Amino acid sequence: MVGGVYKVPIQGRHNNFPHPHVVVLEITGTKECVIVPGFSCEGVELGMYLQDMASMGMSADLVCVELDNAQHVKFIGTMTGKRASWSVERHRRISTKELNTAEKIGEMDAAGLSKIAQGLVKMAEAKPERFSPALVKRMRQLIME
Amino acid sequence: MALSQLLPFNENRFDACMAYLAKKHQRLLTKYDMVKLHVMTDIFHVVEQGKPVIGGSISAWTFGPVVEKAFNRLTWWEKRYIESGAEPESFRFADGEGRYPEFDAKLDVDEQEFSKTELDAMEAAWMCVMSKNWKESQEYFHSTRNFIGRAWNNAQKQVRDLDWEEIVANFEEENGLTHPAVKTLMRF
């Protein structure tokens, strides 16, 4: 499951369309995954978000990891990748059962995943109160692998 | 459009939060306690961080706000226990007082599995929910004098789930706070 890019339906968000999230970590013991949402770098939505983050004292390079999806994500079907911001600040835990209901749209390579994991650790160092210590430990292990 | 769900219901996170709280406070929990602790934990985390701890849409049921999937999970535990004596992985059934069974946590959840903001939200929920008796709790969740009661009343009238934007706006009004970024974060 790790590396999979899924369209996760979160009602009320993104005009009710399922949104791409990448699975960064699978926690087998609790049957959960840590997912990070990705946004087009040109989107208005992303601009508003980054503005709000800045008002809370968090810079764009701290809350997001920018990747060229064309390089790092192999999409299923006809979709093509473009530059995207993966918001490590908005990481979420989701049950594997729930994720299994979402549509898989691609697969991120190890280099892309490692960059996102590093972004999560960097964010956790800056805002430790927002991350569980156990999660950060798992992320560090992921980077080492 | 009402913003009814910020994250799909995470049953594993639900079990972990409830087991952690029950063990920490050395208390048995009823189904009612758990569904209300869930709702208030998510609310206290959303008003600060723009995202819930457990997730799920909050329905406006007769006895107050409830995430239906959490209620169904607990009902399924009960049904299975009554039919076959089987208990869930994380809880054992205790006799309980009166008609309602109580759950005793058997799952040891490491505090390190939660962020500080999540622990704070869970503790605030505990103080809010567990300090009230049944009558006080029902008054709290139905009263138009407080933020959650108002959101519940509107959802009931309009036959819909509770709206997160309304919950946050009511909370901020009640507490004299303005945290505009949370409204964007909720949508992101």
Image: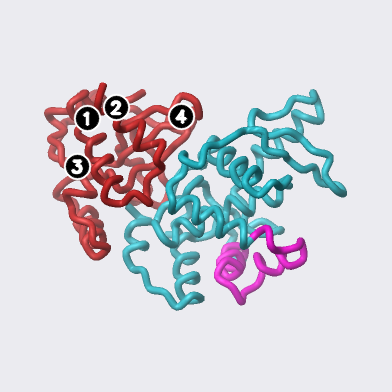
- Look at label 4 and name its amino acid: Thr
Protein chain holding label 4? A
Chain-order first, disc 4 or disc 1: 4
Calculate the distance from the C-alpha at mark 1 to the C-alpha at mark 2: 8 Å
Magenta residues span B129-156
> Tag 4, which secondary structure?
helix
Calculate the distance from the C-alpha at mark 2 to the C-alpha at mark 3: 17 Å
The chain assigned the colour red in the figure is A
- Look at label 3 and name its amino acid: Val
Number of other residues with Cα within 10 Å of mark 4, as a class: few under 14, some 14 to 19, many 20 or more: many
Which secondary structure class fits the magenta region best?
Answer: helix
Q: Please, which residue is most extreme toward the right here?
A: B98
Q: How is the image coloured?
A: by chain
Residue denoted by label 4: A96
Residue denoted by label 1: A114
| Above or below, B67 relative to A106 | below
Residue B42, x across and y down, in percent: 51, 53
- Look at label 1 and name its amino acid: Ser
Locate residue B184 relative to residue B149 in the image: left or right: left
Residue A99, x across and y down, in percent: 43, 31
- Look at label 2 and name its amino acid: Leu
